[in-house]
Image (cartoon, grey):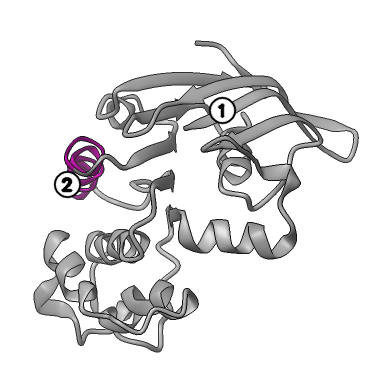
Amino acid sequence: MIHLIDVEKYYGQTPVLKGINLSVERGEFVSVMGSSGSGKSTLLNLIGGMDLPDRGSIKVNGRELSSFSDDQLTAYRRQEVGFIFQFFNLLPNITVFENVRMPLLLNDIADSSGVRGYLQRVGMADKTDRFPHELSGGEQQRVAIARALVHAPEIILADEPTGSLDTKNSRDVMDLLAALAKEEGKTVVLVTHEDYIARFSQKVLRISDGVILA
């Protein structure tokens, strides 16, 4: 489903990714482990179409991302990918329900009946009218996961999604992501620096200084 071939990325003259080759199959849950500055977040940004490689090829479902127009890349990010970040990125002045509905509005989907279903899925159905500042960190991340899923993307990209959570909430979030891959066939790519987080996935890759080691 996702294929990277000889991908390189530079920031100025500094190489961040060096000859990356990576394949992720549909419904697979892959973790990419590496320390800060290893290139793992850059790798996720390239798969998500938020940036483009300087060299090499990135194909998703057989389509070359670098051949997309700006409008096609925007549509790809909005429709086919769900992003989960470390710091939630919830909009502070709107409710939980409205935060989760946001991807539907961006995709011109008027039917918001699925919002409550996804909030139920992440255990937040009783907090639809709360605002983000009224929630714990674990609760905010659950809302962020519901938001990432509500438009039914094929690909879930998670950038250190448990970095701001305690052990119990981290385990709950990872159980949920693992279930999404196993039960719903979502393709999940997660980056982390924590061994115990990576163990929830089906395959673990390690990246160091822009090179995938295993």
Q: Is residue 100 left or right of residue 102?
A: left
Q: Is residue 135 above or below residue 144?
A: below
Give the x, y percent position of residue 184.
21, 44
Which region of the structure is painted magenta?
A: 167-183
Among the two numbered marks 1 and 2 on one chain, the one whose residue lies closer to the N terminus: 1
**Disc on res. 194:** none
For the point 20% across and 35% down, the residue is: 182
Judging by the rendered image, the residue that carries numbered circle 1 is 3
Q: Is residue 171 left or right of residue 154?
A: left
Q: Nearer the viewer, residue 112 or 166?
A: 112
Mark 2 Cα within 10 Å, few/some/many (few <14, many 20+)?
Answer: some
Mark 1 Cα within 10 Å, few/some/many (few <14, many 20+)?
Answer: some
| SS class, disc 2 | helix
Q: Magenta-highlighted stretch: main secondary structure? A: helix
Give the x, y percent position of residue 208.
60, 20
Judging by the rendered image, the residue that carries numbered circle 2 is 172
Q: Is residue 108 magenta?
A: no
| SS class, disc 1 | strand
Q: Amino acid at mark 1?
A: His
